[in-house]
Image: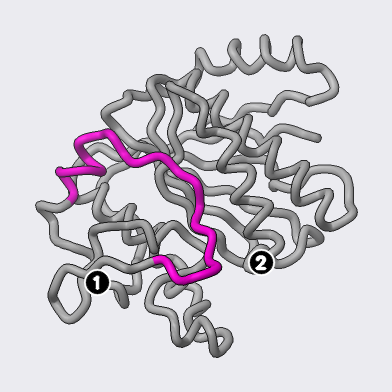
Amino acid sequence: MLDHQGPSLLEPARAFDRLRERAWSLPEVSKNRPVHVSMKTHRDVGRLRRRDAYQAVRGAVATCLGRRDFRIVHVSIQANHIHALAEAHDKYALANGMRAFMISATRRLNALRGRKGQVFIQRYHAVQIGSPLQARNALAYVLNNWRRHREDLDGRAQRRANVDPYSTGILFDGWKVDGRPYTFGIPPGYEPMLVHAPRSWLLTVGWRDRGLIDVRETPGPIAGPARRMATCSPRP
């Protein structure tokens, strides 16, 4: 695991230079190997599984749509942390893309909560995915993470839901229900996350060799060897 001090937004030019310098020491990233990223928030940011916080994170995800070398393809918002699956052309694209997302999310969530300072606790953690099994497990872990935290039992609306409304699960085309492939429709009034479609072989074709994901599957830790890296979140 590699730890790096994140750049300050008060010094954008020097911060960018430092970001690139530190990226040299990060493990290499390949556009063919997606990355599972997790980010934890400070306690005083409050619960993220609320409609207003969802819209704030949704807006931050949308700011990354114009990037050609970095794609967020799935997102899951939990009470105090966020999971994402991303594809990046190299380690610089990953560092810059995550920096852009976290800066935008920090500004939006701070404005929402009427607070200042850091939103994310120091680091984001990134795990590169290198096999169909890891890809399948990562998809299940991210999209069904709410079941791992028993959020599917919290509130009447969520108990009626088969897919996490605070994730991109409704856009996923690899679900199964009662052993059969199933695709969810988008209900009226619901605004899904604005994400890219995956392009890597692992997230489009490879993972399917390991079986579709049951909508009620409760995921465990991601299986298989993984290479982990960490960088600090940028300060507002």
Query: Label 2 neighbourhood size at 10 Å, few (<14), some (14-19), many (20+)?
Result: few
**Residue at 32%, 25% in the rendered image:** 31
**Residue at 75%, 11% in the rendered image:** 13
User: Tag 1, which secondary structure?
Assistant: strand
- Quote the CA–CA distance across marks 1 and 2: 26 Å
Question: Which quarter of the rendered picture does the C terminus lie within?
Answer: top right
Q: Name the quadrant containing residue 216.
A: bottom left
**Residue at 45%, 44% in the rendered image:** 195
Sequence-first tag of 1 and 2: 2
The type of residue carrying mark 2 is: Arg
Judged by its main secondary structure, the magenta piece is loop
Residue 207: x and y, percent?
18, 49
Q: Name the quadrant containing residue 71.
A: top left
Residue 62: x and y, percent?
57, 40
Which region is colored magenta? Answer: 186-207
Q: Nearer the viewer, residue 115 or 186?
A: 186
Which residue position holds label 2? Answer: 51
Magenta-drawn stretch contains 202: yes
Residue 163: x and y, percent?
40, 72
157 up-or-down from 71: above or below: below
**Residue at 37%, 57% in the rendered image:** 171
Q: Nearer the viewer, residue 54 or 45?
A: 54
Q: Is residue 141 left or right of residue 111?
A: left
Which residue position holds label 1? Answer: 214
User: Tag 2, which secondary structure?
Assistant: helix
The type of residue carrying mark 1 is: Asp
Which one is closest to the eye, mark 1 or mark 2?
2
Residue 222: x and y, percent?
33, 55
Q: Which mark is residue 14?
A: none
Q: Is residue 204 left or right of residue 17?
A: left
